[in-house]
Amino acid sequence: MKLLSLFKYFVRFLFLQTLITAITIWYFDNYVFFNAEHKFELYLNLLEDRERFYNFVPISWITIDGLIFLLVTVFMIILYSTKFYTYVNELDFSYENKLLDDYLMLYLMWNSFIFTSLYVFRITGLSRGNLILFSFIVPLILLIFRNSEIISLLLGRSTSKENYISFNLDEFSNFKNLRITAFRNEKQSINCEENKITSVIQEEVNQLNKVINLNLVVIRLENTKKLKKELESYLINLNKKVLIISDNKLAFGTNFIYRLVKVDTKFLYYFNNDIQYGAKFILKRIMDIVISIFIVIFISPLLLIISILIFIKGSSPVVIKQTRIGLHGRKFKMYKFKTMYNNSHIQRSDLKDLSTKKGPLFKIDEDPRIIKGLSFLRKFSLDELPQLFNVIKGEMSLVGPRPLFEEDSEHFDKKYMRRLNVLPGMTGLLQINERNTDDFDIWYKYDIEYIENWNLYLDIKILLKTFRAIKNKNSGI
């Protein structure tokens, strides 16, 4: 196990151990022990047992809370020594989602251990009703934090809503029962000659990615022993999950991280270059939710004032919804304060000759569609503030490439499609560098720079620079 993986493993263990210990101590103190005198009586039992069985332990170490800490730690060590809890293999065969079975297993393991331990250490006379309720809590916590899929589900990204496309995979193939495919939706199955698969994959993936949320590409190979350089490079830079099922052991021309599993006579190559997935996605979503809720609360008076102003101008509804393209091609309704007359978006085709932007971008200087007296909302990006609710819902992030209209994606070629591999954002590298550029190639340059260098620190740095840019703009600096 690599040092980094071992460190992540330890951090996860430490987090869960601390969380469960804190919850257990708090719950016992408030709901299981009847009062302080009851807890003190149990403490005296521990002192008596110390004199009889383990007097080598310093008396200062003997506390009820210390016992709970010890019991939770021992249980977590036992649990983490099992593959059942620590390893969820996406390349296992799974015919049904077994969350209930997993929960029951954790329930039995936790309660058999904790109740036996309480009996051995003479922790008796407890509130039975509250103790029964507690018996369900810890297994639920363990299930939620068992792997990133469940937490991602709670934060708005469900595996069952993800889609995949397959190439040369038989309709009745047993490989469709792999965990990685069984819980996702197959949107398209393509059959083609293997010597033409490079061009077919690029064409079909790019087209499908423009209309649906595409997360996984599955490829079945029978005769190929080495991928073409073009296909290998495309799959690595696709920033999606890729599963290759091959009759032969493949040779790759590029060094990259992948997992190889042999099933019967078939070689399964799996690599996940999805940038915002798993723990990274979870941390980003938590940061987005916390900051967005704080900002919404802080600026709520401003949101109310803007709403009243728009309503006075005779514009209704105050907030409009526009269909935009999000992560992996997923369509969503983006919120904006209404600053244009009704049906303004439909007029784009009639006014396209006036657009000052290049490529799929559309912008008109002194746009005639803007309601008189509301142009300042667009100038200072105040019309974008309702998108904080898109961020809270998980459709957008505070930081990322700006989401474009559905019809704009028709202009994307395979390199532009990489913009869809991260959550769209309210601000990004473009907004703090060349906000008013009319060249989509410059948009793309900053978007790809963000994708290839993304981390939480970069997000925080962009946010801070965005707030500073807004402050400087409003103060005339």
Image: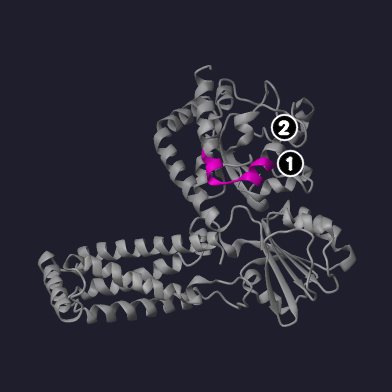
The residue pinned by badge 2 equals 362
The residue pinned by badge 1 equals 408
Q: In terms of image quadrants, where is residue 2?
A: bottom right
Viewer-nearest residue: 128 or 231: 231
**Image quadrant occupied by the N terminus:** bottom right
Please give the name of the residue rendered at 68% of the width and 35% of the height, measured from the top-left corner.
345
Specify the farthest residue to the top.
Answer: 476
Vertical side of 435 occupied by 444: above or below: below
Q: What is the spatial separation of the Cα atoms under label 1 and label 2, in whole angstroms?
A: 9 Å
299 to the left or right of 414: left
* Mark 2 surroundings: few (<14), some (14-19) or many (≥20) residues within 10 A: some
Q: Amino acid at mark 1?
A: Asp
233 to the left or right of 84: right
Viewer-nearest residue: 219 or 42: 42
Viewer-nearest residue: 295 or 196: 196
Span of residues in magenta: 448-460
Q: In terms of image quadrants, where is residue 51?
A: bottom left
**Marks 1,2: beta carbons within 8 A:** yes
